[in-house]
């Protein structure tokens, strides 16, 4: 059944803001087309079949929302999003074509513009004759589906080519171009640096292992602290100042023919020179074998070897100074103790000699013993004489001459005994008696013996301290002498270029992943 077209009667009382003139004209044209359209063929597939086919296409939620908005824009009463896709395709509109989306975005107007249109247009406008579009031949659903699938595939390929082109462009700008600049610097601009390698070892002096620390003597662990301290010294500003003062480190890198990145400015500060020093001087310590390896890089091979020798001499001086104060303090204390023991022994010896000189004898005890022997002998003689006198007096007529001789002998012996007793009393009593002098001499001898023992102990302590101090001496032995290089060691052109490429690629990948994650979160 065909319904005849009927034109709406113009009502001038209609509200001016009911709808815009352009929307009214499009609505009228759509109704006229629907009214004048011939009925479809009898063999048209049912609506449910078409909707099932559309569901199997795997359309995204965004595409379904776009189709629903397009259906509403074109005045199609769709029961669902899939029905909106079906109605749009039946009307000849591809809801997923970019031009349809652009038209949808461009035809939207703000509320102010629509209000202006409704206000300014009071009468129907003259519609220009548009070129008549005759309907084409009807296509079967299979052909339409193949056509739409082909169009979708072409659109996907076109978007894929566009994304690939954009990807290659971004890679060229953010990865390849910086890598080319870095490679150009390393291959054409960078000043070649000649490195000289050296290796040295800190050894401990041979000595007795009398303590627990001696168990580590002869191993690399005995000088670990000294090796670490030497490494820190070679990497410090102290070594830089010595090298700059004596060998002119900064002047070498201030020359005009050195590239700007590695060249020092004429008024460079100590901090800038130290940054360059840390890049050009590499010192490493290997605890497994105790070796300290050093690499010095300069623009000239002879200069690098000279710098290496200077640094090795500074390290040797610093190694000697590490334990010098400790050794000096130990030897100073031991030497002072020995000198004091010597002085005390000398004083005790002088006191003993003075006491011996005061009595004018060397052995007071022998003198006292001699006096006692003489007194005993005189007493024995007196007793003999008294016995002889008694024997003479026992006679009735004793010989007077003999009796007188015996009495005279007894008197003389008694006088001698009294003298010896007086001398014995003089020797045994008083401040200057031989007994007191003997005691003082014995005390002086004991003091001298003690001082001898103290002196011997101080001498032994000094020898032990000297041995320990000699064991604490460190020696720096150079195992690999610096030799001038004939070919430049730096920059490593190919390795540095590849490293720059990987670095830029990693940065680009991280930024791309971050941007894609943020874009996905915003869109969802």
Image (tube, rainbow, N blue to C red):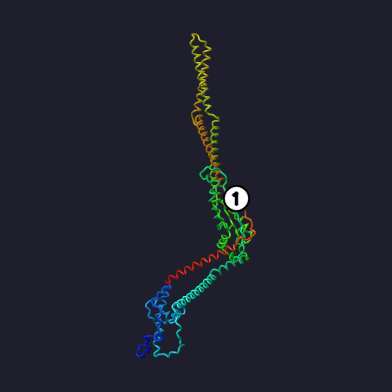
Under tag 1, what secondary structure?
Answer: strand
Quadrant of the drawing holding the N terminus: bottom left
Residue 172 percent coordinates (x, y): 55, 70
Is residue 140 visible from the viewing direction of this image?
yes
Considering depth in this image, is 131 or 239 the residue closer to the camera?
131
Residue 40 percent coordinates (x, y): 41, 82
Residue 90 percent coordinates (x, y): 42, 80
Quadrant of the drawing holding the C terminus: bottom left
Label tally: 1
Indicate left or right for 441 with 305 as reference. left
Residue 158 percent coordinates (x, y): 50, 75
Is residue 117 visible from the viewing direction of this image?
no
Picture layout, residue 459 above or below residue 284: above
Q: Which residue does the image show at 49% across and 28% down from the upper left?
A: 428
The residue furthest left is 13
Local packing at callout 1 (Cα closer than 10 Å; few below 14, some 14-19, many 20+) is some
Indicate left or right for 163 with 475 as reference. left
Picture layout, residue 479 above or below residue 507: above
Q: Which residue is mark 1?
A: 477
Picture layout, residue 15 above or below residue 97: below
Considering depth in this image, is 388 or 138 the residue closer to the camera?
138
Considering depth in this image, is 264 or 298 the residue closer to the camera?
298
Considering depth in this image, is 281 or 464 the residue closer to the camera?
281
Picture layout, residue 325 above or below residue 25: above
The residue furthest front is 43
């Amino acid at each position: 059944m065909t319904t005849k077209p009927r034109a709406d009667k113009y009502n001038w009382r209609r509200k001016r803001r009911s709808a815009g003139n352009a929307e009214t004209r499009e609505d009228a044209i759509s109704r006229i087309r629907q009214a004048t359209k011939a009925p479809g063929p009898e063999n048209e597939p049912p609506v449910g079949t078409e909707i099932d086919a559309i569901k199997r296409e795997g359309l995204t939620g965004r595409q379904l929302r776009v189709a629903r908005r397009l259906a509403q824009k074109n005045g199609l009463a769709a029961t669902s999003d899939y029905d909106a896709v079906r109605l749009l395709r039946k009307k000849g509109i591809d809801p997923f074509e970019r031009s349809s989306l652009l038209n949808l975005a461009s035809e939207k107007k703000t509320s102010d513009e629509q209000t202006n249109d409704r206000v300014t247009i009071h009468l129907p406008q003259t519609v220009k004759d548009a070129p008549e579009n005759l309907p084409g031949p009807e296509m079967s659903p299979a052909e339409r589906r193949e056509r739409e699938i082909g169009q979708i595939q072409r659109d996907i390929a076109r978007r894929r080519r566009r994304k690939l082109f954009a990807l290659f462009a971004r890679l060229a700008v953010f990865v390849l171009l910086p890598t080319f600049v870095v490679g150009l610097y390393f291959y054409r601009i960078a000043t070649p640096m000649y490195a000289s390698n050296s290796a040295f070892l800190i050894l401990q002096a041979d000595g007795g292992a009398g303590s627990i620390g001696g168990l580590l003597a002869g191993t690399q662990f005995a000088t670990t602290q000294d090796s670490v301290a030497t490494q820190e010294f070679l990497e410090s500003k102290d070594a830089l100042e010595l090298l700059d003062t004596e060998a002119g480190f900064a002047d070498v890198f201030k020359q005009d023919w050195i590239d700007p990145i590695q060249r020092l400015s004429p008024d460079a500060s100590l901090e800038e020179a130290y940054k360059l020093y840390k890049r050009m001087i590499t010192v490493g310590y290997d605890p497994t074998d105790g070796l300290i390896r050093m690499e010095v890089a300069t623009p000239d091979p002879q200069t690098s070897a000279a710098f290496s020798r200077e640094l090795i001499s500074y390290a040797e001086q610093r190694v000697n100074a590490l334990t010098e104060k400790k050794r000096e303090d130990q030897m100073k204390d031991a030497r002072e103790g020995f000198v004091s023991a010597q002085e005390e022994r000398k004083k005790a010896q002088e006191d003993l000699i003075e006491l011996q000189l005061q009595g004018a004898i060397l052995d007071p005890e022998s003198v006292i013993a001699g006096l006692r022997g003489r007194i005993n002998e005189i007493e024995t003689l007196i007793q003999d004489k008294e016995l002889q006198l008694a024997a003479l007096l026992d006679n009735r007529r004793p010989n007077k001459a003999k009796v007188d001789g015996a009495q005279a002998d007894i008197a003389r012996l008694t006088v001698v005994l009294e003298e010896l007793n007086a001398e014995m009393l003089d020797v045994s009593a008083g401040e200057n008696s031989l007994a007191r002098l003997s005691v003082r001499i014995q005390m002086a001898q004991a003091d001298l013996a003690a001082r001898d023992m103290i002196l011997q102990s101080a001498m032994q302590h000094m020898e032990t301290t000297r041995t320990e101090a000699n064991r604490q001496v460190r020696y720096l032995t150079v195992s690999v002498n610096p030799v001038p290089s004939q070919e430049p060691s730096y920059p490593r052109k190919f390795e540095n270029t590849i490293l720059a490429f990987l670095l830029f690629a990693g940065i680009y990948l991280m930024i791309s992943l971050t941007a894609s994650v943020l874009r996905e979160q915003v869109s969802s």
